[in-house]
Amino acid sequence: NTLTWGMRKDEKDYTEALVSILHHALKKELKDYQPNYKDIVDAVIELIIDNELATRLKGVSVYLRGDNTLKFLKKQMYPYFLMYLGAKKEEMLNYMMRDSLAFDIDKYTYERNLVNVDLKMFIDFCVKHQKYIIKIEELEII
């Protein structure tokens, strides 16, 4: 497995270059993982690398960027992703304000064990519980 990189635009924004390299590396690492649930895997990769890591590196939230086809899925997974990151229930409002992503905390069961799982186990959790995570009735038709 080889990853090469070297684009002129990366000289202007090293943070974006790092985020892009890590995104591609993780996507390659997980390319055969849960192939029937590729959208869930891709959404988790975006949440981890393109959104949370980039937000921490830049010091400003970039949660609203990414693949438009994954935005609804990512928004639905966001509360559980915060649990995976270890956010306590009382801290979630701060994350929602930071990322401009609101949800009703009381409508979610707080899964305190998510903080103890690895990446693949978190993806498995999302796949296993997708009927509870993905609320089709909240889908916005544009």
Image (cartoon, rainbow, N blue to C red):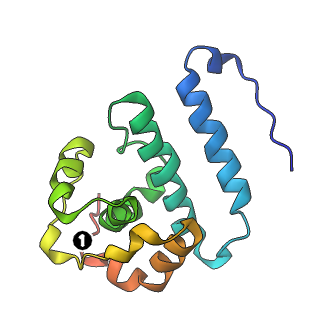
Query: What residue did someone put label 1 on?
Result: 138
Examine the image and state in which quarter residue 107 appears.
bottom left
Which is nearer the eye, 135 or 51? 51
- Please give the count of numbered marks on the rendered protein: 1
Where is 103 relative to 62, above or below? Answer: below
Q: Position of residue 53 (x, y in %)?
A: 47, 42
In this rendering, position of residue 108 left or right of residue 41:
left
Examine the image and state in which quarter residue 41 appears.
bottom right
Seen at 66% across and 38% down, the residue is 21
Q: In what element is the residue under mark 1?
A: helix
Residue count near mark 1 (Cα–Cα under 10 Å), binned few <14, some 14–19, many ≥20: few
Seen at 23% across and 42% down, the residue is 98
Examine the image and state in which quarter residue 51 appears.
top left
Q: Amino acid at mark 1?
A: Glu
Q: Position of residue 8 (x, y in %)?
A: 69, 16
User: Which corner quadrant holds the C terminus?
Assistant: bottom left
Residue 134 visible from this viewpoint:
no
Residue 86 visible from this viewpoint:
yes
